[in-house]
Image (cartoon, rainbow, N blue to C red):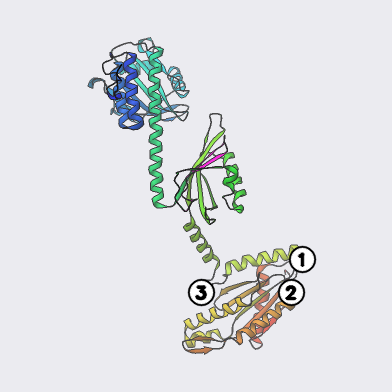
Amino acid sequence: MGINTGNFKNLGNSYEEGSNAAVLSAIARSAEELTSGKGWPDGVNDLLAALGKATGVSRVWIFQTIEVTETHITQNYTFEWAGAARYKQLGMPMFSMFTNKIDRPEYRETIQSRLRGEWQKMVIDKLEPGWFRDNLEVQKIKSMLTIPIMVEDQWWGTLGFDDCDRAYDWSDVEVALLKTAGYLISNAVLRDRLSAKRRQFSILKQLTDSSVWEFDFKTGQIWCSPELLYSVPLPTDNIRFSLHKALHLIHPDDRRPLISSVRRYLKGDRKKVFRFDMRLFTDCGDLRWVEVIGNIRSSEDGKPEQLAGILIDIRKRKREEERLREEAVTDPLTGVTNRRLFEHRLQEFIDYSINEGTVFSVLFFDIDHFKELNDRYGHQAGDQGLRHLANICESHLRRNDLLARLGGDEFALLLPETNQKTASAIGERLLRAVESTPFEYDGKTHIMTISIGLASNDGRLTTPARLIEVADTALYEAKQTGRNRLATLTGCLLS
């Protein structure tokens, strides 16, 4: 006996129209197109045409479900095959993104049935009189079969068969065969969604480095594409991790905040997008800032099944954020802390001193005869002098000391856990260091001196304004009594 071969394109063309064999062969031919050939949407159009010819109906159509509420349903007529021009409805205004009320019992029951994934068949003249029957009779339909298209357990749309010539009662075998066609369309929708996501991800990767990820709540497994984790391309487009392994790829300081953020998201509004910034270790051990973006997919009973999304490389953004933070708290000329951060830290020092009973001190100082330097040699010389002073001070700072430029030639030095005697000694060293370290500008050597006011607090109640006033008054006294010296005022109680 010889071996017969063939392809699905010609399979079953000789079967009698309306026979189950003709329907089955039409589905087989279309399955090949949808899975490996034309796909979406051309393959769907071919499937409807094949089903229409095989079943002998007047019209085969697909309504896409756009939105279903308690009172209304919005659908769109997206695909149609018509056996003759008189049966054609696609393109009519009444079927373009149309909304119907579902307050009529018979129609509401039909919608609810489709939401559950159930098929419906009906002979129109046997329906109860009312809006639903009238609507179908206006379309000159004598019998109808509808099969819901379910995508990821959701009612995506409806595959419909209208017969305008026969009051036909579909058999169970026919319904089962045509339900298979519904599965093919569902698969085509999923393939199209996946293709769209791949296209979007491809565009995204052109704009920024990124990876795709997915966490399965049932298995506890995380799937991730390798782009951000591996510096060398891998022969695979995906990697799977246990949750334990995945957490160890995250910087230790970011693990607990991530878990807490996910828990808050699961307890909150799951329709919102989950976002979290964290640091990942690459295969080389380097740290990379990424933003985790994802959303949740839940079961019908509300239990989370899958959390999935993308990872985006945000190192550039983090560098920019750091630059902006530095600018917000840093004096642009000298690079030391600005007045805003100084006043914030001063309040922290006061609170700590009051709570713990510790002492701290503040040195206020400015350049002697700074105006003369600016007037005689220009503001560029003055700027050079300010930078020179900041460099000298920074070279004498202890680990937790804080130097700030308050404006003009005024500076402040916060000295934590430093009593008045020690602070005075630090100030005297600064006086001598500045005086003995001239700076060069425009070929000339400039000798500079400073005057310092000292204020200390040993846990007594005070405010930043009061402490600044005391230190500023001490500075004024240093100026009035000869400059290039340090003056001290004791006590800064609230008055």
The secondary structure type at the circle numbered 2 is loop
* Quarter where residue 264 is shown: top right
Label 1's element? Answer: loop
Residue bounds of the magenta highlight? 213-231
Kind of residue indicated by mark 1 = Gly
Spatial separation of the CA atoms under disc 2 and disc 1: 12 Å
Front in this rendered view, residue 14 or 272: 14
Q: Is residue 116 left or right of residue 390?
A: left
**Is the residue marked by circle 1 packed among few (<14), some (14-19), or many (20+) residues within 10 Å?**
some
Q: Earlier in the sequence, mark 1 or mark 3?
A: 3
Residue at 51%, 71% (x, y): give it: 332
Q: Which one is in front, 172 or 120?
A: 172
Q: Residue at x 35, y 10 (%)?
A: 125
Residue at image coords 41%, 33%:
190
Q: Can I make out residue 437 in this image?
A: yes
Residue found at the far front of this picture = 1
Please name the residue that numbered disc 1 is placed on.
357
Q: Nearer the viewer, residue 78 or 352?
A: 78
Residue 441 in magenta? no
Q: What residue does disc 2 label?
A: 419
Horizontal and vertical percent position of residue 56: 29, 15
Residue behind mark 3: 333
Q: Amino acid at mark 3?
A: Leu
Classify mark 3: helix, strand or loop: loop
Quadrant including the N terminus:
top left
